[in-house]
Amino acid sequence: MSVASKPSSSFVPKDPASLHPETRLVHAGTTRSPFGETSEALYLTQGFVYDTAEACEARFKGEDPGFVYSRYSNPTTAMFEERMALLEGAEAARATASGMAAVNAALLCQLSAGDHVLAARALFGSCRWILEDFLPRYGVETTLVDGCDLDAWRAGVRPNTKVLFLESPTNPTLDIIDIEAVAGIAHAAGARLVVDNVFATPLLQHPFKLGADIVVYSTTKHVDGQGRCLGGIILSSQQFMTEHLQTFLRQTGPSISPFNAWVMLKGLETLALRVERMQASAGRIADALAGEAKIAKVIYPGRDDHPQAALARRQMSGGGTLVTFVVEGGKEGAFRFANALRLIRISNNLGDAKSLITHPATTTHQRFTPEARAEMGISDGLLRLSVGLEHADDLIDDLKAAIAAL
Protein backbone atom coordinates (compact mmCIF):
# COMPACT_ATOMS: atom_id res chain seq x y z
CA MET A 1 0.00 0.00 0.00
CA SER A 2 1.33 3.40 -0.96
CA VAL A 3 1.32 5.99 1.84
CA ALA A 4 2.06 9.70 1.53
CA SER A 5 5.26 10.80 3.21
CA LYS A 6 3.63 13.29 5.59
CA PRO A 7 0.24 14.61 6.67
CA SER A 8 -1.29 17.38 4.64
CA SER A 9 -1.54 20.82 6.14
CA SER A 10 -4.75 22.30 7.49
CA PHE A 11 -7.29 22.09 4.69
CA VAL A 12 -9.12 25.32 3.87
CA PRO A 13 -9.86 26.02 0.18
CA LYS A 14 -9.14 29.73 0.53
CA ASP A 15 -9.07 32.49 3.14
CA PRO A 16 -11.45 31.18 5.85
CA ALA A 17 -12.79 34.66 6.54
CA SER A 18 -14.10 34.83 2.98
CA LEU A 19 -16.14 31.65 3.37
CA HIS A 20 -19.71 31.51 4.59
CA PRO A 21 -20.23 30.01 8.09
CA GLU A 22 -21.90 26.93 6.63
CA THR A 23 -18.74 26.19 4.62
CA ARG A 24 -16.41 26.80 7.54
CA LEU A 25 -18.50 24.38 9.62
CA VAL A 26 -17.70 21.61 7.14
CA HIS A 27 -14.11 22.33 6.07
CA ALA A 28 -12.29 24.67 8.43
CA GLY A 29 -9.41 23.36 10.48
CA THR A 30 -9.19 19.95 8.83
CA THR A 31 -5.76 18.29 8.96
CA ARG A 32 -5.42 15.08 6.98
CA SER A 33 -3.13 12.20 7.87
CA PRO A 34 -0.93 10.48 5.25
CA PHE A 35 -3.92 8.26 4.44
CA GLY A 36 -5.91 11.20 3.02
CA GLU A 37 -9.13 10.34 4.83
CA THR A 38 -12.35 12.20 4.00
CA SER A 39 -13.65 12.34 7.57
CA GLU A 40 -11.43 13.87 10.21
CA ALA A 41 -9.16 11.33 11.86
CA LEU A 42 -9.78 10.28 15.44
CA TYR A 43 -6.50 10.10 17.39
CA LEU A 44 -7.23 8.07 20.52
CA THR A 45 -3.83 8.41 22.13
CA GLN A 46 -2.61 9.65 25.49
CA GLY A 47 0.94 10.48 24.48
CA PHE A 48 3.30 10.79 21.53
CA VAL A 49 6.73 9.33 20.71
CA TYR A 50 9.90 11.02 19.48
CA ASP A 51 12.73 9.84 17.26
CA THR A 52 15.39 11.00 19.72
CA ALA A 53 15.74 12.34 23.24
CA GLU A 54 16.90 15.62 21.70
CA ALA A 55 13.68 15.86 19.69
CA CYS A 56 11.67 15.23 22.84
CA GLU A 57 13.53 18.00 24.66
CA ALA A 58 12.91 20.43 21.81
CA ARG A 59 9.23 19.58 21.75
CA PHE A 60 8.83 20.20 25.48
CA LYS A 61 10.72 23.49 25.21
CA GLY A 62 8.40 24.60 22.43
CA GLU A 63 11.29 24.84 19.98
CA ASP A 64 9.83 22.09 17.80
CA PRO A 65 6.09 22.42 17.09
CA GLY A 66 4.02 19.32 17.70
CA PHE A 67 2.05 17.36 20.24
CA VAL A 68 3.37 16.33 23.63
CA TYR A 69 0.48 14.86 25.64
CA SER A 70 -3.26 14.73 25.00
CA ARG A 71 -3.97 16.57 28.24
CA TYR A 72 -2.21 19.55 26.62
CA SER A 73 -3.31 19.06 23.02
CA ASN A 74 -4.24 16.37 20.53
CA PRO A 75 -4.57 16.35 16.71
CA THR A 76 -8.32 15.66 16.78
CA THR A 77 -8.94 18.21 19.52
CA ALA A 78 -6.82 20.76 17.66
CA MET A 79 -9.02 20.40 14.56
CA PHE A 80 -12.12 21.04 16.65
CA GLU A 81 -10.52 24.08 18.27
CA GLU A 82 -9.39 25.54 14.97
CA ARG A 83 -12.78 25.05 13.36
CA MET A 84 -14.54 26.76 16.26
CA ALA A 85 -12.03 29.63 16.21
CA LEU A 86 -12.52 30.16 12.47
CA LEU A 87 -16.29 30.04 12.89
CA GLU A 88 -16.30 32.45 15.82
CA GLY A 89 -13.68 34.84 14.46
CA ALA A 90 -11.33 34.21 17.39
CA GLU A 91 -7.54 34.07 17.33
CA ALA A 92 -7.38 31.04 19.61
CA ALA A 93 -9.56 28.36 21.17
CA ARG A 94 -9.14 25.59 23.73
CA ALA A 95 -11.64 22.78 24.24
CA THR A 96 -12.59 21.49 27.69
CA ALA A 97 -14.35 18.47 29.16
CA SER A 98 -17.65 20.32 29.68
CA GLY A 99 -19.25 23.74 29.44
CA MET A 100 -18.81 24.36 33.15
CA ALA A 101 -15.13 23.48 32.86
CA ALA A 102 -14.91 26.20 30.20
CA VAL A 103 -16.67 28.78 32.38
CA ASN A 104 -14.60 27.92 35.44
CA ALA A 105 -11.28 28.01 33.56
CA ALA A 106 -12.10 31.23 31.70
CA LEU A 107 -12.68 32.95 35.04
CA LEU A 108 -10.10 31.34 37.31
CA CYS A 109 -7.17 31.65 34.92
CA GLN A 110 -7.28 35.44 35.12
CA LEU A 111 -8.30 36.02 38.75
CA SER A 112 -6.38 36.32 42.01
CA ALA A 113 -7.29 36.97 45.63
CA GLY A 114 -8.44 40.57 45.98
CA ASP A 115 -9.97 40.78 42.50
CA HIS A 116 -13.63 41.53 41.84
CA VAL A 117 -16.07 39.97 39.35
CA LEU A 118 -19.22 41.77 38.24
CA ALA A 119 -21.87 39.54 36.69
CA ALA A 120 -25.45 39.50 35.53
CA ARG A 121 -27.87 38.04 38.06
CA ALA A 122 -29.70 35.84 35.55
CA LEU A 123 -27.34 32.91 35.00
CA PHE A 124 -27.32 29.14 34.83
CA GLY A 125 -27.38 27.75 38.37
CA SER A 126 -23.86 26.28 38.25
CA CYS A 127 -22.45 29.60 37.01
CA ARG A 128 -24.07 31.34 39.97
CA TRP A 129 -22.49 28.77 42.28
CA ILE A 130 -19.01 29.53 40.94
CA LEU A 131 -19.58 33.25 41.47
CA GLU A 132 -21.36 33.16 44.82
CA ASP A 133 -19.87 30.10 46.55
CA PHE A 134 -16.60 29.09 44.92
CA LEU A 135 -14.69 32.25 44.01
CA PRO A 136 -15.18 33.94 47.43
CA ARG A 137 -13.42 30.96 49.09
CA TYR A 138 -10.24 32.14 47.38
CA GLY A 139 -10.60 35.82 48.10
CA VAL A 140 -12.33 36.89 44.89
CA GLU A 141 -15.24 39.26 45.48
CA THR A 142 -18.36 39.02 43.32
CA THR A 143 -21.34 41.27 42.68
CA LEU A 144 -24.54 40.37 40.83
CA VAL A 145 -26.64 42.99 39.03
CA ASP A 146 -29.68 43.17 36.79
CA GLY A 147 -28.01 42.43 33.45
CA CYS A 148 -30.52 44.51 31.50
CA ASP A 149 -29.81 47.63 33.60
CA LEU A 150 -26.73 49.37 32.21
CA ASP A 151 -26.67 51.83 35.11
CA ALA A 152 -26.43 48.86 37.48
CA TRP A 153 -23.39 47.59 35.55
CA ARG A 154 -21.77 51.02 35.77
CA ALA A 155 -22.52 51.34 39.49
CA GLY A 156 -21.20 47.84 40.18
CA VAL A 157 -17.70 48.45 38.82
CA ARG A 158 -14.97 48.80 41.45
CA PRO A 159 -11.29 49.71 41.20
CA ASN A 160 -10.42 46.00 41.59
CA THR A 161 -12.95 44.75 39.01
CA LYS A 162 -11.15 42.43 36.62
CA VAL A 163 -13.96 40.55 34.87
CA LEU A 164 -17.53 41.18 33.78
CA PHE A 165 -19.54 38.04 33.03
CA LEU A 166 -22.90 37.47 31.35
CA GLU A 167 -24.97 35.11 29.24
CA SER A 168 -27.39 36.35 26.59
CA PRO A 169 -30.04 35.16 26.05
CA THR A 170 -30.16 34.23 29.72
CA ASN A 171 -31.05 30.84 31.14
CA PRO A 172 -33.98 30.26 31.46
CA THR A 173 -35.82 33.59 31.10
CA LEU A 174 -34.28 34.52 27.72
CA ASP A 175 -33.44 38.09 28.73
CA ILE A 176 -31.28 39.89 26.15
CA ILE A 177 -28.33 41.84 27.54
CA ASP A 178 -26.66 44.59 25.54
CA ILE A 179 -23.26 42.98 24.99
CA GLU A 180 -21.75 45.96 23.18
CA ALA A 181 -22.71 48.36 25.95
CA VAL A 182 -21.47 46.08 28.73
CA ALA A 183 -18.21 45.54 26.82
CA GLY A 184 -17.74 49.30 26.75
CA ILE A 185 -18.28 49.48 30.52
CA ALA A 186 -15.78 46.68 31.07
CA HIS A 187 -13.10 48.19 28.88
CA ALA A 188 -13.51 51.64 30.42
CA ALA A 189 -12.73 50.00 33.76
CA GLY A 190 -9.75 48.07 32.41
CA ALA A 191 -11.63 44.78 32.79
CA ARG A 192 -12.44 41.93 30.39
CA LEU A 193 -15.88 40.78 29.33
CA VAL A 194 -16.62 37.04 29.30
CA VAL A 195 -19.78 36.02 27.40
CA ASP A 196 -21.53 32.66 27.60
CA ASN A 197 -23.04 32.41 24.10
CA VAL A 198 -24.66 28.97 24.38
CA PHE A 199 -28.29 29.95 23.88
CA ALA A 200 -27.56 32.12 20.83
CA THR A 201 -25.19 29.58 19.20
CA PRO A 202 -22.19 30.75 17.13
CA LEU A 203 -24.53 31.35 14.19
CA LEU A 204 -27.09 33.75 15.67
CA GLN A 205 -24.87 36.06 17.74
CA HIS A 206 -21.23 37.13 17.45
CA PRO A 207 -19.95 38.42 20.81
CA PHE A 208 -16.45 39.27 19.55
CA LYS A 209 -17.93 41.70 17.02
CA LEU A 210 -19.82 43.28 19.92
CA GLY A 211 -16.67 43.77 22.01
CA ALA A 212 -16.43 40.60 24.12
CA ASP A 213 -12.93 39.49 25.13
CA ILE A 214 -13.63 35.83 25.89
CA VAL A 215 -16.49 33.63 24.66
CA VAL A 216 -17.43 30.30 26.22
CA TYR A 217 -19.71 27.48 25.11
CA SER A 218 -21.06 24.27 26.43
CA THR A 219 -20.60 22.33 23.21
CA THR A 220 -22.69 19.61 24.87
CA LYS A 221 -25.65 21.61 23.60
CA HIS A 222 -26.14 22.68 19.96
CA VAL A 223 -22.63 21.78 18.76
CA ASP A 224 -23.05 18.09 19.55
CA GLY A 225 -26.80 18.46 19.13
CA GLN A 226 -27.66 14.79 19.49
CA GLY A 227 -27.27 14.06 23.19
CA ARG A 228 -24.04 12.09 22.91
CA CYS A 229 -21.06 13.77 24.54
CA LEU A 230 -20.01 16.44 27.00
CA GLY A 231 -17.74 19.26 25.90
CA GLY A 232 -16.91 22.92 26.21
CA ILE A 233 -14.71 25.52 24.57
CA ILE A 234 -13.07 28.85 25.39
CA LEU A 235 -12.31 31.34 22.61
CA SER A 236 -10.11 34.40 23.01
CA SER A 237 -7.23 36.43 21.67
CA GLN A 238 -3.88 34.70 21.31
CA GLN A 239 -2.46 37.05 23.94
CA PHE A 240 -5.04 36.01 26.53
CA MET A 241 -4.47 32.38 25.63
CA THR A 242 -0.70 32.69 26.04
CA GLU A 243 -0.65 34.86 29.16
CA HIS A 244 -3.50 33.32 31.13
CA LEU A 245 -5.31 30.29 29.81
CA GLN A 246 -2.74 27.96 28.25
CA THR A 247 -0.72 27.24 31.37
CA PHE A 248 -3.83 27.05 33.55
CA LEU A 249 -5.37 24.36 31.34
CA ARG A 250 -2.11 22.47 31.01
CA GLN A 251 -1.54 22.28 34.75
CA THR A 252 -5.14 21.74 35.95
CA GLY A 253 -6.23 19.32 33.21
CA PRO A 254 -9.92 19.95 32.33
CA SER A 255 -9.20 18.53 28.87
CA ILE A 256 -11.75 17.11 26.47
CA SER A 257 -11.54 13.50 25.33
CA PRO A 258 -10.31 13.24 21.72
CA PHE A 259 -13.35 11.08 21.01
CA ASN A 260 -15.70 13.78 22.28
CA ALA A 261 -13.81 16.38 20.25
CA TRP A 262 -14.30 14.21 17.16
CA VAL A 263 -18.04 13.94 17.86
CA MET A 264 -18.17 17.74 18.17
CA LEU A 265 -16.37 18.11 14.83
CA LYS A 266 -18.98 15.94 13.14
CA GLY A 267 -21.76 17.86 14.91
CA LEU A 268 -20.47 21.14 13.53
CA GLU A 269 -21.03 19.92 9.97
CA THR A 270 -24.82 19.99 10.47
CA LEU A 271 -25.07 22.83 12.99
CA ALA A 272 -26.37 25.43 10.52
CA LEU A 273 -29.08 23.12 9.19
CA ARG A 274 -30.18 22.11 12.67
CA VAL A 275 -30.28 25.64 14.10
CA GLU A 276 -32.22 26.92 11.10
CA ARG A 277 -34.87 24.21 11.48
CA MET A 278 -35.07 24.49 15.27
CA GLN A 279 -35.39 28.26 15.12
CA ALA A 280 -38.16 28.17 12.52
CA SER A 281 -40.11 25.72 14.67
CA ALA A 282 -39.45 27.71 17.85
CA GLY A 283 -40.96 30.81 16.29
CA ARG A 284 -44.09 28.93 15.25
CA ILE A 285 -44.41 27.33 18.69
CA ALA A 286 -44.04 30.66 20.48
CA ASP A 287 -46.82 32.16 18.35
CA ALA A 288 -49.06 29.14 18.95
CA LEU A 289 -48.56 29.24 22.72
CA ALA A 290 -49.18 32.99 22.86
CA GLY A 291 -52.74 32.42 21.69
CA GLU A 292 -53.60 29.96 24.47
CA ALA A 293 -55.67 31.19 27.43
CA LYS A 294 -53.99 28.86 29.95
CA ILE A 295 -50.52 30.10 29.03
CA ALA A 296 -49.92 33.16 31.20
CA LYS A 297 -46.77 34.35 29.45
CA VAL A 298 -44.59 33.48 26.46
CA ILE A 299 -40.96 34.62 26.20
CA TYR A 300 -39.21 34.35 22.85
CA PRO A 301 -36.57 36.81 21.56
CA GLY A 302 -38.00 36.62 18.04
CA ARG A 303 -41.41 38.03 19.05
CA ASP A 304 -42.27 41.72 19.16
CA ASP A 305 -43.65 41.37 22.70
CA HIS A 306 -40.26 40.32 24.12
CA PRO A 307 -39.09 42.94 26.67
CA GLN A 308 -35.87 43.52 24.71
CA ALA A 309 -37.24 42.86 21.22
CA ALA A 310 -35.44 45.80 19.60
CA LEU A 311 -32.11 44.83 21.15
CA ALA A 312 -32.63 41.20 20.13
CA ARG A 313 -33.15 42.25 16.51
CA ARG A 314 -30.04 44.42 16.60
CA GLN A 315 -27.79 41.93 18.41
CA MET A 316 -28.99 38.56 17.09
CA SER A 317 -29.82 37.32 13.61
CA GLY A 318 -32.75 35.25 14.88
CA GLY A 319 -34.84 34.40 17.90
CA GLY A 320 -33.06 31.18 18.80
CA THR A 321 -34.12 27.63 19.48
CA LEU A 322 -35.61 27.99 22.98
CA VAL A 323 -39.04 29.14 24.12
CA THR A 324 -39.87 29.90 27.74
CA PHE A 325 -43.46 30.13 28.94
CA VAL A 326 -45.52 30.23 32.13
CA VAL A 327 -48.52 27.98 32.64
CA GLU A 328 -51.37 28.58 35.04
CA GLY A 329 -51.36 26.73 38.34
CA GLY A 330 -47.77 27.22 39.50
CA LYS A 331 -45.66 24.12 40.13
CA GLU A 332 -48.68 21.81 40.09
CA GLY A 333 -49.80 23.17 36.74
CA ALA A 334 -46.27 22.99 35.30
CA PHE A 335 -45.87 19.37 36.39
CA ARG A 336 -49.30 18.42 35.03
CA PHE A 337 -48.41 20.05 31.72
CA ALA A 338 -45.00 18.35 31.45
CA ASN A 339 -46.37 14.95 32.43
CA ALA A 340 -49.07 15.21 29.75
CA LEU A 341 -46.55 15.60 26.93
CA ARG A 342 -46.01 12.52 24.81
CA LEU A 343 -43.53 13.64 22.14
CA ILE A 344 -41.54 16.28 24.00
CA ARG A 345 -39.36 14.69 26.67
CA ILE A 346 -38.57 15.95 30.17
CA SER A 347 -34.85 16.69 30.39
CA ASN A 348 -32.61 19.52 31.59
CA ASN A 349 -30.46 19.47 28.43
CA LEU A 350 -30.98 21.74 25.42
CA GLY A 351 -29.93 22.16 21.79
CA ASP A 352 -30.74 18.51 21.09
CA ALA A 353 -32.34 16.98 18.00
CA LYS A 354 -35.12 15.87 20.35
CA SER A 355 -37.39 18.53 21.85
CA LEU A 356 -36.83 18.75 25.61
CA ILE A 357 -38.68 20.54 28.37
CA THR A 358 -37.55 21.37 31.90
CA HIS A 359 -38.94 23.02 35.01
CA PRO A 360 -36.10 25.32 36.11
CA ALA A 361 -37.45 25.98 39.62
CA THR A 362 -36.99 22.30 40.52
CA THR A 363 -33.98 21.46 38.34
CA THR A 364 -31.32 23.90 37.09
CA HIS A 365 -32.22 26.55 39.68
CA GLN A 366 -33.66 24.41 42.48
CA ARG A 367 -30.94 25.28 44.99
CA PHE A 368 -31.97 28.94 45.10
CA THR A 369 -34.51 30.31 47.56
CA PRO A 370 -37.95 31.23 46.21
CA GLU A 371 -36.99 34.88 46.68
CA ALA A 372 -33.80 34.48 44.63
CA ARG A 373 -35.69 32.67 41.87
CA ALA A 374 -38.31 35.41 41.83
CA GLU A 375 -35.53 37.98 41.49
CA MET A 376 -34.32 36.10 38.40
CA GLY A 377 -37.85 35.89 36.99
CA ILE A 378 -38.19 32.14 37.57
CA SER A 379 -41.71 31.41 38.77
CA ASP A 380 -43.07 28.01 39.76
CA GLY A 381 -45.15 27.91 36.58
CA LEU A 382 -42.24 28.64 34.24
CA LEU A 383 -41.11 25.98 31.75
CA ARG A 384 -38.18 26.07 29.30
CA LEU A 385 -38.65 24.32 25.98
CA SER A 386 -35.67 23.42 23.78
CA VAL A 387 -37.11 22.90 20.31
CA GLY A 388 -35.72 19.98 18.35
CA LEU A 389 -35.90 18.70 14.80
CA GLU A 390 -39.35 17.16 14.86
CA HIS A 391 -42.04 18.61 12.59
CA ALA A 392 -43.40 21.80 14.12
CA ASP A 393 -47.02 20.68 13.64
CA ASP A 394 -46.41 17.55 15.71
CA LEU A 395 -44.78 19.58 18.49
CA ILE A 396 -47.63 22.10 18.53
CA ASP A 397 -50.19 19.28 18.69
CA ASP A 398 -48.31 17.77 21.65
CA LEU A 399 -48.21 21.12 23.45
CA LYS A 400 -51.90 21.80 22.85
CA ALA A 401 -52.82 18.35 24.20
CA ALA A 402 -50.81 19.17 27.35
CA ILE A 403 -52.59 22.52 27.67
CA ALA A 404 -55.91 20.69 27.56
CA ALA A 405 -54.75 18.70 30.60
CA LEU A 406 -54.34 21.83 32.72
Image (tube, grey):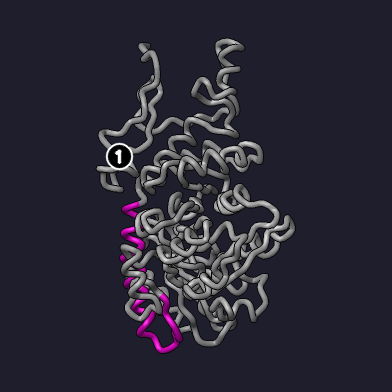
Q: Residue 152 appears at what percent x and percent y?
A: 53, 74
The quarter of the picture where residue 124 lies is bottom right
**Left or right relative to 296: residue 13:** left
Left or right of 137 in this view: 143: left
**Magenta run includes residue 363:** no
Identified by mark 1, the residue type is: Pro
Looking at the rendering, the stretch of residues picked out in magenta corresponds to 272-299
Q: Nearer the viewer, residue 201 or 184?
A: 184
Please provide percent x and percent y for residue 89.
37, 47
Q: Position of residue 202 (x, y in %)?
A: 39, 54
What quarter of the picture does the N terminus occupy?
top left
Q: Is residue 12 left or right of residue 126?
A: left
Eyeballing the image, is 178 above or below 266? below
On the image, the x and y values in percent for residue 299 come to 42, 76
Which residue is at a point 48% across and 61% down the rendered structure image? Answer: 188
Residue 227 makes an appearance in the image:
no
The answer to if 286 sits in the magenta stretch is yes
Location of residue 300 with respect to 259 vertically, above or below: below
**Identity of the residue drawn at 70% across and 54% down:** 113
For the stretch drawn in magenta, the main secondary structure is helix
Left or right: 38 in relation to 160 = left
Q: Which residue is mark 1?
A: 16
Which residue does the image show at 40% across and 33% down from the upper left? 40
- Kind of element beneath mark 1: helix
